[in-house]
Every structure is written in structure tokens, then in C-alpha cells.
Amino acid sequence: MGGLSGRRRWEPEFRDNKNQTNPELLEQIRLKALNNNGELSDVDLASAVRASGNVMGAQSSAEMVQNLSHDIHGLGVLEEFARRPGVTDVLVDARGQIWIDDAQGLRLTGAGFSDPAAVRALAVRFAAGVGRRLDDSQPFVDLSLGRYRVHAVLPPIATGGTLISIRVKHQQSLGLNSLLDPQHSDWLQALEAIVMARMNILISGGTGAGKTTLLSAMLTQVPTDERIIVVEDSAELIPQHPHLISLQTRGRNVEGVGEIGLSDLVRQSLRMRPDRLVVGECRGAEIGDFLGAMNTGHEGAAGTIHANSVQSVPARLIAMGSLAKMTPQATALQAASALDLLIHVARDPHTGVRGPIQLGHLELSNAGNLEVHLIKEHGRETQESVALDWFRERLEVGGKTSPW
């Protein structure tokens, strides 16, 4: 692939010849990572460096271990972009161009890869570093690399070239006070009250809308004497709470066995005395176990779901319920009984500010269908309604008051 005029281009893996890591040594360590399920400590790396015979002096050894750690565990040249303040996503498109997403929106960085094989090699290295395979027989992978969630797709599934999508997990969760701008002061009061009233909630929104960020901030409000158990595909929720238990799914290994899914983790979490059960993202059959847990006395539960508005959540729930072999009627009954509130978040296309914009309540219609009754919509005058009265009464039971 030719370079793009006026743009900085590079190959992945190595910064310059001085710091270049021996490719054969890298390959040896990647194979060891596969055998160790991707778990390699600095001690393992130091042993590999010494065994290679390519080191001269303690300083060179330390530098080589650092470079190896960067190449095995990190993002290589993409790390520079992922570490920029405020960046939430780093993307490599089929042309090798590097994009970032932050408060200013999604944009090109002006940097990229000149060789399609270089992008593929980087993606394969990500997979091998955690004991996963990425090749023609398994052309896509979703994995965690430290504070990053990485997804990669190889051609020909990815037409035009290898695609890499990296989500940056925030190291520290913001509290609601820090997260919400002054325009959401009424929402701050409402969300704090919702947490204290132990209401079961789902936070909906599109990709990158801030669902996980808002949920993490709300969980920081949970009283410190309560035990929170979080189950996720990729550990992203990091609320500042003294009793947080985090469980993460596991994919199949290179032999095609060993998979542990969200449904497995939800069932296991119920045996771990949760005061609050949290599913990072509901997107499949685990919804059946999650709704069942909420309907058996687990209050204060929470999760996120991809949806365009609170009104589109019922259809998403019905679709996921079918994956759990639940009929639409059964899903509707379970959801209406289990879930108290839906909170929809979005990012302002003009300012980039993310925050809650809709609050809704799930109910069954006379015909047995799952419906959403709007309680509040940000930026619009509050309308008196049966749903708003219900919300006020629920908060009052917990000694809280509604801002609306």
C-alpha cells in the first residue's frame, strides 16, 4: 500500500533500529504466551532475554525486557494514541489510517501504516499475546490487553484490509459530581436517589455514548457496606468502591475449549452473596438469568444495553430473550417485573458532552406487550404523568425526593 501524502507513516512493532526487538525472540515468547494462556511476567521476559544471548550489560537487559513487555502486552505504536488524555477509542481502518475518538469527536490522526501486512501482524500479535488465535480459520477476535479492549478482523472478512478497534478503559471512575455537567444538575439528584432507593436499572445508548462511564459513576454512590458483583465480557467497570468483585468471561482457547460466558458468570455470582448484581453489557442469552435474578429478590441490579432510545429497549429485550429460549410473552413479563427504570444516554453532536437524556419506566400493556412510559426527557419541560407519580413514590419510600 502506498503512503498518504503529508501523513506520518510507519511499520508496527519497532520504534527504531536501536530499540528493535529480535523478531525470533519475539516469536519464541509469543509461543510461550500461547502455552501459558497469555500470562507472562517480567521475570519470564527477563529469563527469555538472558536465554537469547542478545544482551550486553544490565542496562541493555532492562531495556530489552521493557521493549518486550511493550510488544507482548501493550499496543505497540498504537499505544501513543491510546494514552492521549480523553481518548476513548483508537481505530485502524482498511487503508491503514489511524483514527481516534475523544471529546472532539472521531477524527484522523494523520498517521498510519504503509504496509497492509504490518497491520495484520500487529493484530495477530495482540491475539497471540493472550493465548488466542487470529488467522484465516479464525479471522476475528475480541480480547482484553490490560486497560484496552481490542477487536480485530482479518481479510477477506474485512474487505480491503485488516481492521483494528481499540476501546480505552478508564483507569479511574469519575463520580457523578465530576461526570455530569451543570446542565444535568437535576439528573445528578435523580441518579443519586435512584441508587440509594435500590432500583433495578438498564442504561441504554449507542456505541461510545457513555453507558459504561455513567454506570461506573452511579456504582460509586453505592453504600460502602454493600457488596457489588460485576460480570463483563471485558473488565471495564471500575467504580471507586471498597467491596467490588469483578468477573470476566473467557473465550475458547486454541483447542476450542474452555469458554465461560456471561450466563455462566451470572449464575455463579448468585452464589457469592451479591448486594448488587451488575452485568456490564446485556446482549444475549444472559438476559434470562439476569432478569431471573432480579425477580428473585436481588434489588439494586444494573446493566447496560445497546439501543437508540428508551422506547427501543423492549424490542431489544424481546430479541435477547429469544436467544435464551424465552417467548416474547415470558420476556415481557419478566422484564416488566424485574426492571424499574431505563436511563438513556447520548453524546451531544455539537459539544461532545455525554450524559443522560431520557428516563423511562417499563410496564405491561393491557394486551401483554412491553411498553415504556417516559418520566423525563432532558431539555424538555417535565410533564405530569402516572409514570412520574410512580417515580416520586418509589423515591419517597427510600427517603429521597425527585427533582421533578
Image (cartoon, rainbow, N blue to C red):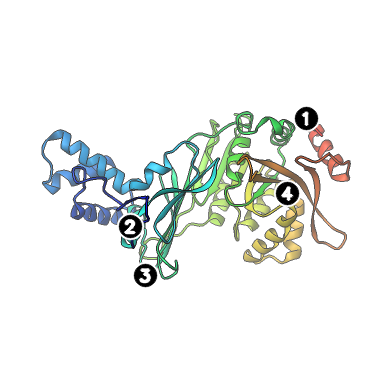
Mark 2 vs mark 4, CA separation in Å: 50 Å
Disc 3 vs disc 1: Cβ atoms closer than 8 Å? no
Q: Nearer the viewer, residue 184 or 227?
A: 184
User: At numbered mark 4, what does the secondary structure look like: helix, strand or loop?
Assistant: loop
Question: In the rendered image, which residue does mark 1 sit on?
Answer: 400
Percent x, y of residue 269: 56, 47
185 w.r.t. 335: above or below? above
Sort mark 2 into few (<14), some (14-19) or many (20+) by Cα contacts within 10 Å.
many
111 w.r.t. 398: above or below? below
Percent x, y of residue 274: 60, 41
Mark 1 or 2 closer to N-term? 2
Sort mark 4 into few (<14), some (14-19) or many (20+) by Cα contacts within 10 Å.
many
Three-letter residue code for mark 3:
Asp
User: At numbered mark 2, what does the secondary structure look like: helix, strand or loop?
Assistant: loop
Three-letter residue code for mark 1:
Lys
Is label 1 or label 2 in front? 2
Identify the image quadrant of the N terminus. bottom left
In the image, which disc is placed on residue 136? 3
Query: Along the horizontal axis of the image, is 311 left or right of 42?
Result: right
Percent x, y of residue 362: 78, 51
In the image, which disc is placed on residue 114? 2
User: At numbered mark 1, what does the secondary structure look like: helix, strand or loop?
Assistant: loop
Disc 2 vs disc 4: Cβ atoms closer than 8 Å? no
Mark 3 or 1 closer to N-term? 3
Question: In the rendered image, which residue does mark 4 sit on?
Answer: 339
Mark 2 or 3 closer to N-term? 2
Q: Nearer the viewer, residue 99 or 345?
A: 99
